[in-house]
Image (tube, rainbow, N blue to C red):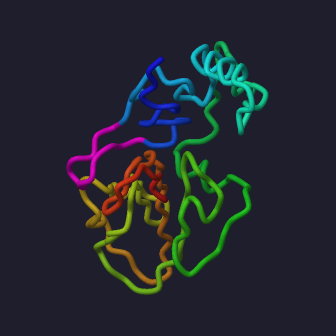
């Protein structure tokens, strides 16, 4: 039996969402890199994994005998889902969500707030006026709101600077809804796979 890799490498447990090492060359990862690996893309084991474990169990005096087979990750079929509109706009709903907020002088990463997937709403009160928003460190896709009025988007692969539709002034509320678009499975300057921080 020839094994190229034990665990699926491109999108293991659906963690990453891009492949490449340049700002404009990033391409979405939509599928598994190696479908025949003993550990599947979603982290489940398959017949090849079980066969390897069974084979190693037959070897006498093996230093590291196989552990018991792990359970597959739980999966559910939700069937038909009915959605109910809760408000008139996205931002009106987001500002009503009663979740614990994290406060900091600088924006916290998804890892800093223990939120590996989905969206994070960043909110601040502006202390001085201006008409241009610059976010050179953004690694995802951000929807920008000024006083709850949509202004446009900033994104890692197209524009990290946005000219606001209306000039901001001190006391205005700036909100950026950041969509986590997944992690690259390699990081510039490293010769081994790793997951990018967000």
Compared to residue 90, the image places residue 156 above or below, namely below
Residue appearing at x 51%, y 42% in the figure? 15
- Residue 23 drawn in magenta: yes
Q: Position of residue 1 (x, y in %)?
A: 48, 17
- Residue 13 drawn in magenta: no
| Residue extending furthest toward the right | 68
The answer to whether residue 75 shows anywhere in this view is no
Instruction: Give the quarter of the image for residue 88.
Output: top right
Q: Nearest the camera: 169 or 134? A: 134
Q: Position of residue 65 (x, y in %)?
A: 74, 32
In the drawing, does residue 1 fall left or right of residue 92?
left
Residue appearing at x 64%, y 62% in the figure? 113
Q: Which residues are magenta?
A: 17-28
Compared to residue 22, the image places residue 76 above or below, namely above
Compared to residue 189, the image places residue 35 above or below, namely above
Instruction: Give the quarter of the image for residue 59.
Output: top right
| Residue extending furthest toward the front | 61
| Residue extending furthest toward the left | 24
Residue appearing at x 73%, y 62% in the figure? 100
Residue appearing at x 71%, y 38% in the figure? 64
Q: Nearest the camera: 12 or 87? A: 12
């Amino acid at each position: 039996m020839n094994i190229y890799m034990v665990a699926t490498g491109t999108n293991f447990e659906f963690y990453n969402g891009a492949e490449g090492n340049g700002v404009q060359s990033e391409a979405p990862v939509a599928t598994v890199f190696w479908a025949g690996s003993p550990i599947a893309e979603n982290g489940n084991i398959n017949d090849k994994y079980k066969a390897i474990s069974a084979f190693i169990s037959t070897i006498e005096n093996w230093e590291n005998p196989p552990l018991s087979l792990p359970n597959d990750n739980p999966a559910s079929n939700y069937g038909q889902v009915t959605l109910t509109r809760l408000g008139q706009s996205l931002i009106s709903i987001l500002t009503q969500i009663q979740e614990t907020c994290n406060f900091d002088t600088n924006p916290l990463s998804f890892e800093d707030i223990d939120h590996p997937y989905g969206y994070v709403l960043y909110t601040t009160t502006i202390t001085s006026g201006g008409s241009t928003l610059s976010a050179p460190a953004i690694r995802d896709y951000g929807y920008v709101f000024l006083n709850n009025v949509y202004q446009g988007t900033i994104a890692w692969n197209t524009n990290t600077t946005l000219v606001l539709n209306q000039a901001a002034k001190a006391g205005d509320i700036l909100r950026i809804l950041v969509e986590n678009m997944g992690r690259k499975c390699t990081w510039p300057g490293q010769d081994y796979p790793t997951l990018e921080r967000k």
